[in-house]
Amino acid sequence: MAVRAVRGATQVDADDRDQILEATTELVAEVMARNGLTTDQVISVLFTATPDLTAEFPALAARKLGFHEVPLLCAAEIAVPHALPRVIRLMAHVETDRPRAEVQHVYLRGATALRLDIAQ
């Protein structure tokens, strides 16, 4: 099996704990489903949030989905002027037989604007 990186992002309407957890849960579930992954295949996940999101750690949503033995880390995105606000991103390192070209990156809600070339 190869190690691949899977990217994803979503956007919330407000810096609200429930919104952050709901959107992150949706994002993680979609990444897993579209790539046919189990938590045993996930090596680690890095979550970032734009500086305007501080109400909760996005990684908590992954823990609630069963990522108990997966190393998770949250970090703040750099504050780029005119960047899309209220965005949660992830980069998961996974073991998979899929070729790099078949890895499904997932961009949801307003974050589809970040990658119009691959957004679903």
Image (tube, rainbow, N blue to C red):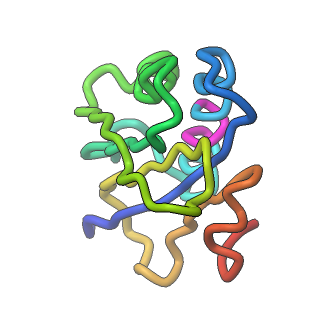
| Residue 90 falls left or right of residue 35 | left
77 and 32: which is toward the camera: 77
| Residue 68 falls left or right of residue 112 | left
74 to 97, vertically: above or below = above
Residue 56 drawn at (x, y percent): 48, 19
Characterize the magenta stretch by its predominant secondary structure: helix
Q: Assign the C terminus to one quadrant of the image.
A: bottom right
81 and 57: which is toward the camera: 81
Residue under the point 51% across and 23% down? 61
Q: Is residue 118 magenta?
A: no
Residue 46 drawn at (x, y percent): 32, 45
Residue 105 drawn at (x, y percent): 55, 65
Residue 74 drawn at (x, y percent): 32, 35
Q: Which residue ends up furthest to the front in the rendered image?
A: 81
5 and 98: which is toward the camera: 5
Residue under the point 46% across and 24% down? 54
106 and 15: which is toward the camera: 15
Q: Is residue 27 magenta?
A: yes
- Within the image, what quadrant is residue 1 found in? bottom left
The range drawn in magenta is 25-29
Residue under the point 35% across and 41% down? 76
